[in-house]
Structure formats: C-alpha cells, structure tokens
Amino acid sequence: MMNLASEIFIAEDLPVVYVKPLNAVVLSDVHIGYEEDMASKGIFIPKIQKKRFLTVYKRALKVFKTNKLVVNGDFKHSFSKLSKQERAELTEILTTLKEEGVELKVIRGNHDNYLSSLLEKFDNVELLDEIVYDKIIIFHGHKEISIEKGRIYIIGHEHPRLSIRDKLGFAHKIQCFLKVPLNEGATAIVLPATGTYQSGNDISLIHTNYMSPLMRKNGVLEKTKPYGIIEGQGIMEFPELSLLKDLIL
C-alpha cells in the first residue's frame, strides 16, 4: 500500500484510491454502455466494461476492507440517453452492489445524463455533484471550481496515460494516477479510468492537452508526478514530468 497524499492510499495494481477519513474506495470513468455506442457507429468490440468494473470494485473493497464505494463520474457512457445496454448492465451492477451490502455514492460526470431515474430505485445509492470532507473534495473534474489553499481535489475525467520511450527506443504506454501541485497551494489527485476502453489520454507538459479546467488552468505540470499501474505487479512511482520530458512521447 502506498500513501499518495494525506490519508489517501493506492495499492496493488488497482485503478482506485482509498480515502481513509471516508473509509471509502473511489474510482472513476467506468463508461458502461461504451460498446453499444461504438456498435451504433459500425465498430464492434467485446462487451467487457461491466466485467471490468465488477472485478475492480470487488478486489478493491476486499483489499481496503470496506463496503463503501464512490464512483467519481462517468458511470455510464451515452450523453443523450440511457441506452438499452446501460440500463441492463447498470441494473445488474446496482442489484449486485445492493445484495452485497455496498454503500454507493455516484458523483455526476459529464456522461451521467438520465442516470437519476435508475439510481433512485436503489436505497443504498446516493447521487451527488461532489463530496466534501474536511480538506478533501471529490468531484469529476469537468466543471470549473474555485481552488482553495490546502485542499486536496480528487478528480477523474482525464483518463491519464504515461507514454514514454526507453533507452532502446521501445514505447511503453502506462495507465497512471497523477499527483498534481496546483498554483493556489492545493493538490489534485487524478484517477485513471476504470473502463478498459478509456485508458489512454497521454499526459504532457502542455496545459491545453488536458480536458479538466483544474489541470488546464491550475496544474503545475513540471512538478506533476505519475504513478504508473503495472498490471499484475503493482504501482510504480515515476519522477516529476520535468525530469521525464525527454522520454515522454
């Protein structure tokens, strides 16, 4: 287990953080229903998003010994509707969580339109715009907020991936967490995506390459540290981006 920030931990090769004061596992960007959306565009891919989520959350709750789960935005994929696949798979997921006694909080992401009508059928689920506890603020990251000194902001939305080239010239693409100092004396923790098909927006030293206003306007990118997820092995702490600039693709 690794202490990523004050009372925030990561472990094994899981794309989640454990927030000790909340006794909760936090993950982001599940994107249930992505496969159906791709199929509507003529692109047919295996339906694995649901299985991935179920595997990750069950392992994470066991590792961190809790029954509290937070999905930090983009639980579903479609912007314009609650699709057939989303309704079926989310109902199955929510039923499983209910049966297993999991307390679920879902924070609205930019993809989570039309989700409330489904979630309100389950009394173990709460739909929120953010979670604020002491100095920790958990929100999806797609909206602008005012930054306060000393706060820790846990966001998703970016789907961060570190793409680097080794000394032999081989490229490596590594899903990662980011620990980001902010201009106002605060810190951001950026979660990797949980969804298999959302695992890659390359991080860089260019502010305009980021999707979240928090990163674009406030991130001190030179001092940002990636924590790469090495599947089946664990999490690797990398140097600050300023020291990786010649290796980043």
Image (tube, grey):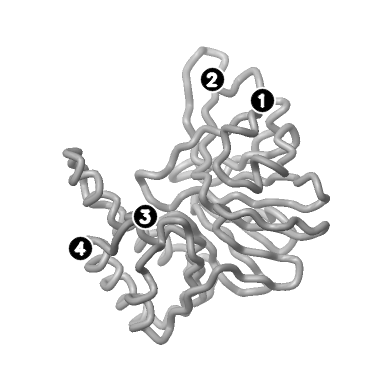
Helix, strand or loop for disc 4: helix
Q: Which amino acid does label 3 sit on?
A: His
Q: Earlier in the sequence, mark 4 or mark 3?
A: 3
Q: Which of marks 3 and 2 is in front?
A: 3
Q: Distance between the residues labelled 2 and 1?
A: 10 Å
Q: Which of marks 1 and 4 is nearer the N terminus?
A: 4
Helix, strand or loop for disc 3: loop
Quadrant of the rendering where the C terminus is positioned = top right
State the residue in front, 47 or 167. 47
Quickly name the residue at label 2.
165
Relative to 194, does residue 198 appear above or below in the rendering?
Answer: above
Relative to 45, does residue 151 appear above or below in the rendering?
Answer: below
- Residue 236: % across, % down: 59, 40
Quadrant of the rendering where the N terminus is positioned = bottom right
Q: Give me the disc on residue 244.
A: 1
Q: Which amino acid does label 4 sit on?
A: Lys
State the residue in front, 95 or 116. 116
Q: Distance between the residues labelled 1 and 4?
A: 44 Å
Which residue is pictured at 30% across the width and 68% down the height? 90
Q: Which of marks 1 and 3 is nearer the N terminus?
A: 3
Quickly name the residue at label 3.
31
Which residue is pictured at 76% across the width and 60% down the height? 151
Q: Are marks 3 and 2 in contact (CB under 8 Å)?
A: no
Q: Give me the disc on residue 84.
A: 4
Toward the front, the furthest residue is 80
Tell me: 72 left or right of 111: right
Image quarter for residue 25? bottom right
Q: Which amino acid does label 1 sit on?
A: Leu
Relative to 172, does residue 189 appear above or below in the rendering?
Answer: below
